[in-house]
Image (tube, rainbow, N blue to C red):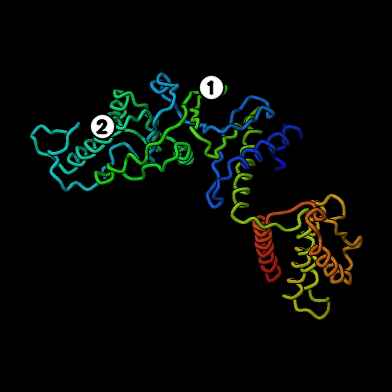
């Protein structure tokens, strides 16, 4: 990204690129149809050259003083929830006698329970049973994507279970993968029996200080092909651009696993497409106003593609293919296109040099075509008016 180079040197950019590439390669799962787990944590202040990767899962969330006092912890059992451990008035319909449930309950002065109070009793009873079950299974840590009710949090701490709440959706999936389990997605009395299958283990959970930021470090017990990149930058402006570029790189690399097809890069496809479009432009003659406008738009679009190709290749060679020095001469377009297309198909990967992903190239061309069509509509409107 050109903006990402603001305030950074070529050495720093190269270091970040190498770190991203290493992290992604090491995170590729055995089943390439699964999405790699690569996290990104930003730390503003240090030099960009201090960017590094780690095989641990680093969770950047607010940490309470109670949680800090209970850390670090070695070889804990972790229960992972992506559902709320708070009172949810719509989670379960109450159709049973509430007197059979133990735990905390809400009582009224006159002894009569409204439907809301009955639901509150049901929810608190259900959550109390979850805490008892977790304690019986020897769970040491509860990681929850959403909130944890204050009473439930108090009960967890009383039983020496560390509550970690408000973990983001991306982080909760990473924590679950680090533990080797799937997170609990729904709570009900019928699902309490399967709660044991959502409890995993990690090698350790530690509190780490990164400048002014405190983060949780989950270290997996076994190699689970997970990586976290700790991205550093001297100021917020550089960090914003670098982080945006890094996320785009991870998305692009993940797409490459699902569609691992490439084409000659370095502007070769743009030049071929430019030649093809120019070869289809009708010759100047007795054309109607609509046809002249269409021809002008196509010619402008083809020239833009050729210009992009020349900027990408730097010189006038693309993948070993030489462009005509006088590309503006119309009578050379068809011959140039035929020669370029024939030559590019016969090149080896070494001769082509740079390669582009088909998926990203199709997306770029589709975006360019949409932009050209929109400009054509504007031009047509101006001409007619």
Q: How many marks?
A: 2
Q: Residue at x 88, y 59 (%)?
A: 322
Residue 7 lies, in percent from the top left, at 72, 32
Question: Which residue, given by chain and number where applicable, does mark 1 sit on?
Answer: 209
Find out whether the residues at labels 2 and 1 contact each other: C-beta distance under 8 Å: no
Question: Which residue, given by chain and number where applicable, does mark 2 sit on?
Answer: 132
Left or right: 126 with respect to 9? Answer: left
Residue 33 versus residue 234 in the image, above or below: below
Local packing at callout 1 (Cα closer than 10 Å; few below 14, some 14-19, many 20+) is few
Residue 214 lies, in percent from the top left, at 50, 24
Name, please, the residue furthest toward the front. Answer: 222
Indicate the quadrant where residue 144 lies: top left
Local packing at callout 2 (Cα closer than 10 Å; few below 14, some 14-19, many 20+) is few
Mark 2 to mark 1 CA distance (whole Å): 33 Å
Q: Quadrant of the N terminus?
A: top right
Q: Residue at x 57, y 35 (%)?
A: 228
Residue 370 lies, in percent from the top left, at 65, 62
Left or right: 28 with respect to 77? Answer: right
Pick the residue in front: 330 or 59: 59
Left or right: 215 with respect to 237? Answer: left
Residue 230 lies, in percent from the top left, at 60, 31
């Amino acid at each position: 990204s050109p903006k990402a180079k603001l305030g950074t040197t070529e050495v720093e950019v190269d270091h970040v690129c190498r770190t991203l590439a290493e992290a992604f390669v090491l995170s590729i799962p055995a089943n390439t149809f699964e999405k790699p787990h690569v996290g990104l944590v930003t730390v503003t202040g240090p030099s960009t050259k201090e960017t590094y990767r780690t095989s641990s899962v680093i969770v950047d969330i607010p940490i309470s003083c109670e949680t800090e006092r209970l850390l670090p912890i070695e070889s804990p059992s972790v229960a992972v929830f992506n559902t709320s451990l708070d009172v949810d008035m719509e989670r379960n319909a109450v159709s049973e006698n509430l007197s059979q449930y133990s735990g905390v309950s809400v009582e009224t002065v006159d002894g009569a329970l409204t439907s809301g109070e009955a639901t509150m009793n049901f929810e608190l009873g259900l959550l109390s049973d979850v805490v008892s079950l977790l304690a019986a299974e020897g769970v040491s840590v509860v990681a929850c994507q959403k909130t944890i009710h204050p009473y439930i949090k108090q009960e967890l701490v009383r039983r020496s279970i560390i509550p970690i709440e408000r973990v983001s959706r991306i982080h909760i999936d990473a924590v679950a993968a680090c533990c080797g389990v799937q997170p609990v997605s729904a709570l009900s009395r019928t699902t309490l029996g399967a709660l044991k299958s959502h409890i995993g283990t990690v090698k350790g959970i530690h509190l780490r200080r990164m400048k002014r930021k405190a983060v949780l470090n989950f270290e997996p017990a076994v190699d689970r092909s997970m990586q976290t990149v700790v991205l550093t930058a001297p100021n917020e402006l550089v960090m914003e651009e670098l982080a945006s570029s890094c996320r785009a790189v991870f998305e692009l690399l993940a797409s490459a696993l699902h569609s691992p097809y490439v084409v000659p890069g370095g502007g070769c496809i743009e030049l071929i497409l430019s030649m093809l479009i120019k070869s289809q432009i009708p010759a100047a003659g007795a054309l109607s106003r609509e046809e002249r406008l269409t021809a002008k738009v196509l010619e402008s679009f083809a020239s833009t593609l050729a210009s992009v190709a020349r900027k990408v290749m730097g010189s006038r060679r693309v993948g070993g293919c030489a462009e005509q020095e006088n590309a503006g001469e119309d009578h050379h377009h068809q011959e140039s296109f035929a020669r370029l297309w024939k030559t590019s198909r016969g090149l080896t990967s070494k001769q082509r040099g740079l390669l582009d992903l088909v998926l990203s190239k199709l997306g770029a061309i589709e975006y360019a075509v949409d932009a050209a069509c929109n400009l054509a509509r504007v031009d047509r409107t101006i001409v007619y008016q």
